[in-house]
Image (cartoon, rainbow, N blue to C red):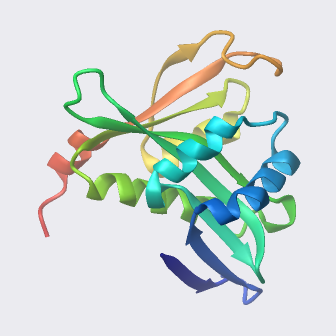
Amino acid sequence: MSDDDDDQGGGARVVFRDFTPEHEDALRKLNAVIFPIRYSDKFYVECAAAGSATQLAFVEDVLVGAIACRLELLPDRSAAKLYVMTVGVLAPYRDKQIGTRLLTHSLNFAFADPFVTEVYLHVQVNNLDAISFYTKKFGFIQQGVALHYYKRLEPPDAAVLALDLSKKRKSCPAS
């Protein structure tokens, strides 16, 4: 799946694509630039297993942003949750709505699948801009704090944010 779209400011065209194994090296390089940790091979296997929930943003065939997700089956196998592992955009491409559009795509993916009942993620507790972004723009609710979640970051605690899709589906009339 691919979604082409012009940048809002008339700049370079942004192309959104599903993550596939041939994109793994590019995503590894992007993550190394954006995030302070190195992700395991399992991370990339989970990205691929999440299907089109994991999305990549390209400008002129250069990977500039990504959202990495994994699907988690509930213990009773009655439903699944979508866990947003990372959302990241290279600094020169921020403030161009790329991260917003990546998250919107993943939320739409989850919302369209009635088996997925919730989307959740972790945000470092001192990252108030990110917490505000998720809660105010997308309706996530803070469910608590995971103490000592991050091993190499200060502070190590993470806010746990969740979006209950079953409630959202009930509030949306069928089209």
Left or right placement of residue 167 versus residue 20 in this view: left
Left or right placement of residue 6 versus residue 138 in this view: right
Q: In terms of image quadrants, where is residue 159?
A: top right
Q: Residue at x 79, y 67 (%)?
A: 93
Q: In terms of image quadrants, where is residue 96?
A: bottom right
Q: Is residue 127 above or below residue 68?
A: above
Q: Position of residue 131 (x, y in %)?
A: 60, 36
The residue furthest left is 174
The residue furthest top is 147
Q: Is residue 62 above or below residue 87?
A: below
Q: Position of residue 158 (x, y in %)?
A: 64, 21
Q: Residue at x 23, y 29 (%)?
A: 77
Q: Does the image show residue 70?
A: yes
As rendered, which of 1 and 25 lies closer to the eye?
25
Q: Residue at x 42, y 54 (%)?
A: 107
How many marks do you count on the picture? 0
Left or right placement of residue 138 versus residue 31 in this view: left
Q: Position of residue 117 (x, y in %)?
A: 28, 39
